[in-house]
Structure formats: C-alpha cells, structure tokens
Image (spheres, rainbow, N blue to C red):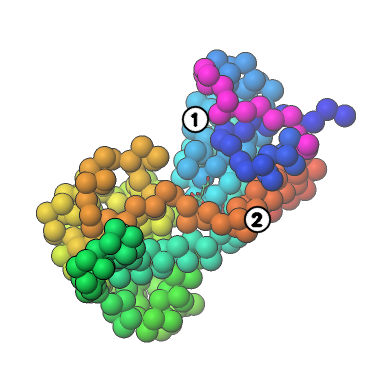
Amino acid sequence: MSKPIILQVGPYPAWDQEPLDQAFDVKRLFEADDRAAFLARVGPDVQAIATRGELGADAAMIAACPNLRLISVYGVGYDAVDLDAARAAGVAVTNTPDVLTQDVADLGVAMMLCQSRGMIGAAAWVRDGSWARDGLYPLQRRVFGRKAGILGLGRIGFEVGKRLAGFDMEIAYSDVAAKDYAPDWEFINDPVALAARSDFLFVTLAASAETRHIVGADVIKALGPEGMVINISRASNIDEEALIAALADGTLGSAALDVFEGEPALDPRFLQLDNVLLQPHHASGTIETRQAMGKLVRDNLTAHFAGQPLLTPVT
Ligand code: 8YV
C-alpha cells in the first residue's frame, strides 16, 4: 500500500525523521532550492503538512496543496499557521501542548536568575582572569522576595508562577479574566499596571493579532529602569523597536529573550547591548521534550490517516 504523502516544512532530529520517513512519503520543502517550484510540483499530492511552531504554514502553502487535510505543528504556538486559510480549506490543525510546558517555564525562570545575578558576566570574570586580577565581581540584584508579573496565565505562565512561588516572590498576573486555579496571585487586568508593580515581567501569552505588541512603549516604561522583561512566548508580543530603544537609553533595566523578530537573523542592535540576555529560541529544547513533541506530531498524523480523532487539535 502506498504511504500517505506529507510535506515537511523544516528539519527534525534524526529520532523523528526516521519514523516519519518510515510511515510517510515525505516531501522535504526545506531541502528545495526553489521552494515555489517545489510546492507547485508536489503540492497537489500533499495530504498533510508537518511543520514547526516558528515556521508554520502560510496561505500560499495551504493554497498550493488542494488535497491537504491536516497541518501537524511541532510546537505549542501555531501563530505562524494561517488559521483562516486552513479553516476555509477544511484543513485541521494540531499542535504539541502540555509536553513542553515544564521545560519552557524552567528556561524562563533560569533566564531571570541568570540575568538578575549577572551569571554570564560572572563566568567571563572567572575565565578572563578578572577575578584574580581585580577581585570581587560587582554586586547584582536578588530575585528572592521580589515582585513578578506574568502576562498570560495559561499553562506555561502558571508553571512559571509555581516556580516563582518557590522564591517567595510576590506574584501578580494579567489575562483576559482572573483564573480560579491561581487564587493566591493577584489579578491585574491592565498590562501597564501589572508592569508598574513588577520587578520582573514574564511574557507567556499565546501570540495572535490581538496580542501583537501588547508589551509596547507604555508597558516597558512602567516596568522601568530597574525592571526586567523575560520573553519565552513570541517576539510579536513585544514592540521590538520600543524594547531596543528602552534598553539602549536605560528606560528599561534589562531583558532576557528567547524569541526575536525575523529569527534567527535577529536585529543586530541587540548584539551591542550588554543588558540583554539572548537565547536561541530553545525554551522547549531538551531531549525529553523534543522527543515527546516529535511523537505527538507523528501520533496526530497517524490518527488522521487512520480516521481516528486527533489527539491535540487546535480548536
Ligand atoms: C519550538 C515553539 O522551539 O512550541 C512552540 O511554539 O516555538 C517551540 O517549542 C519550535 O517549534 C521548534 O521548532
């Protein structure tokens, strides 16, 4: 029996590629020199797309695949999938929620600690001989007991909060409504007001057109010269121009970022700033989580082709 034909948008680790190649006839878009010509050639045969969170599937890709019925996303974020185009074409979308929540929260909290305690600079202080030559490393700011704001108290935001509670931080959050699963944390409707009372602002919102630049110049100014923003969601949730300007002139104290507009080709001005911790979009990047994400991508594809209910459909 012939295998179902799927379009693979970006590479996966070998432990995912091998089972994918076994189960499906995989057309690798990312290996094509001319993507448009490749899509025009294979598109009519494609029955499903396997993509990654940050790569998604745009309207042109969906239109090039008239027999497409499923887009299986390797990632919890599906903002890069044109959901309207998918819906109009009768294409279901799945993502990989839950399996990555803990690791993403871990990295966000690690970034806060690393940046607040100056660990990158401190490591260089040891390695370059400054410690032996100049003595003690400049004092840094504590995390314990300070005020954390969480913008978006979904699965990841909630796990961030649980970890911050372990540092006896005063926790508040913004979301569309107060959450009954967080009775001990203060609900502050307005992101500007949340930032104004916070030392650390975690951005943990699912990105959408509505949340674009929700962290704008007003939120950044409210966070202030002693404040830190930590972004483990999507770059589009922050106005990057306003962020870079505020980091450069000291209106904002510091930032810890795992995501960037146009990544991996981030704005070169970030590289000139010493008050920002830069991470290569790897909050879910542990072996354990990536294996679980890959399995869920395949399990959704398998369920679809077996005529069974999808495991994690985007509704
Ligand atoms: C991944 C992500 O880094 O889950 C998401 O939305 O962006 C990440 O987990 C990405 O999808 C891996 O390619």
Q: Which residue is mark 2?
A: 292
Horizontally, residue 236 falls left or right of residue 55, namely left
Q: Tell me, yes or no, if residue 253 can be seen here.
A: yes
Q: How many marks?
A: 2
Horizontally, residue 224 falls left or right of residue 279, namely left
Which residue is rendered at x = 43% and y = 81% of the image? Answer: 166
Dot 2, crowdedness within 10 Å: few (<14), some or many (≥20)? some
User: Height in image: 163 above or below 151?
Assistant: below
Residue 249 % position (x, y)? 12, 54
Report the amino acid beneath label 2: Ala
Q: Which residues are magenta?
A: 22-36
Report the amino acid beneath label 1: Ala
Q: Quadrant of residue 198?
A: bottom left
Which is more N-terminal, label 1 or label 2? 1
Question: For the view shown, which residue lies furthest in the left direction?
Answer: 249
Foreground pick, 148 / 44: 148
Horizontally, residue 72 falls left or right of residue 265, namely right
Which residue is rendered at x = 31% and y = 83% of the image? Answer: 145
